[in-house]
Image (spheres, rainbow, N blue to C red):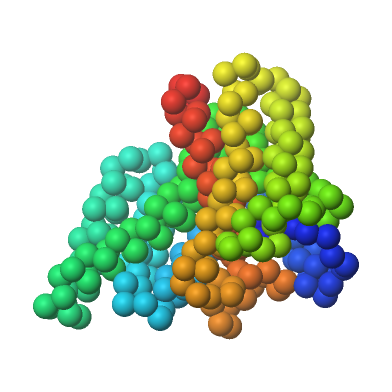
């Protein structure tokens, strides 16, 4: 979600680049989401793969760097499993991915079993952090008959939290939210983003005619998780001592830190909405 919960500052070249990028990427996401099927799959998979690659490259100066060689193919198989609504596909892919990662790392350093386990752990984290939410979004879109509406609920929560957070942060932002993790974010921006996101999310449910009281916690908590997801990705960058997440030569979103900066909140919100709908019996 990048700098959505921001402090007040004047327009910058970076901000203009972000606006231009958003004006291109968001319509594509909306149109492919409406189309669904293979079209949405072909949009989701490249974004997921780039996000996973950024995650693994972020760890490049550490001994516990995850394996993109096994992690990304595993992620693709998991996403396809959710797209096909075949649980055994993603389950088999997860088990095989973990086993192959362990075998690969042990073959590289036969006497470093503990290190190999750590690398399996970071590889698995990339899968859980990015691939499963991508699969959840594909699964949401395929829910009948309201799949596109549930997908757009995820979009509405994520993008509205970002937008309202940025605007209120610029106008009213004074109190730092998490200065050690993300110094540009403010408490005022976070509150504005959370409260503002409730409007389009609840509005979408009402207009679609599916609003029920049981859905209130899903919408109320969603924007809080969007802010948390943003902070989590910022904390990851601080932990691995990198300024931006993008891979050199693959910065496909000018004005942004990388694909992870655009989906950091989305992955948390998609996971929350998908699991909540499972619990209440919608999926």
- Where residue 14 appears, as percent x and y from the top left, is 78, 72
The quarter holding residue 27 reads bottom right
* 67, 143: nearer the viewer: 67
Q: How many marks?
A: 0
Above/below status of 220 relative to 100: above
Q: Residue at x 46, y 22 (%)?
A: 281
- Where residue 23 appears, as percent x and y from the top left, is 79, 60
Is residue 69 at least partly visible in the picture? Answer: no
Above/below status of 73 relative to 34: below
- Where residue 258 appears, as percent x and y from the top left, is 60, 69
Is residue 270 at least partly visible in the picture? Answer: yes
Q: Residue at x 71, y 48 (%)?
A: 187
- Where residue 140 appears, as percent x and y from the top left, is 53, 38
Quadrant including the N terminus? bottom right
The quarter holding residue 66 reads bottom left
Q: Residue at x 52, y 62 (%)?
A: 235
Q: Is residue 189 left or right of residue 182?
A: right
Q: Is residue 222 left or right of residue 184?
A: left
* 15, 29: nearer the viewer: 15
Q: Residue at x 35, y 40 (%)?
A: 86
Q: Is residue 135 left or right of residue 165?
A: left
């Amino acid at each position: 979600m990048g700098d959505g919960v921001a402090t007040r500052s004047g327009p910058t070249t970076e901000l203009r680049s972000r606006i231009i990028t958003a004006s291109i990427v968001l319509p594509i996401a909306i149109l492919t989401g409406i189309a669904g099927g293979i079209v949405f799959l072909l949009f989701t998979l490249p974004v997921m793969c780039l996000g996973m690659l950024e995650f693994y490259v972020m760890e490049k100066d550490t001994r516990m760097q995850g394996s993109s060689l096994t992690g990304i193919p595993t992620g693709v198989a998991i996403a396809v499993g959710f797209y096909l609504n075949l649980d055994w596909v993603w389950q088999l892919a997860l088990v095989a991915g973990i086993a192959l990662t362990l075998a690969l790392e042990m073959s590289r350093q036969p006497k470093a079993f503990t290190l190999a386990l750590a690398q399996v752990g970071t590889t698995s984290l990339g899968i859980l952090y990015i691939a499963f939410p991508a699969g959840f979004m594909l699964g949401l879109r395929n829910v009948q008959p309201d799949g596109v509406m549930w997908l757009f609920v995820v979009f509405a929560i994520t993008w509205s939290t970002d937008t309202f957070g940025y605007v209120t942060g610029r106008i009213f932002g004074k109190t730092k939210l998490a200065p050690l993790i993300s110094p540009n974010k403010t408490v005022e921006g976070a509150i504005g983003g959370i409260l503002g996101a409730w409007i389009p999310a609840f509005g979408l449910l009402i207009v679609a005619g599916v609003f029920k009281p049981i859905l209130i916690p899903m919408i109320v908590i969603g924007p809080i998780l969007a802010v948390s997801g943003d902070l989590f990705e910022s904390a990851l960058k601080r932990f691995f001592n990198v300024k931006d997440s993008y891979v050199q030569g693959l910065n496909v979103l000018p004005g942004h830190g990388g694909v992870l900066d655009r989906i950091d909140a989305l992955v948390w919100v998609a996971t929350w909405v998908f699991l909540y709908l499972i619990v209440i019996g919608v999926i």
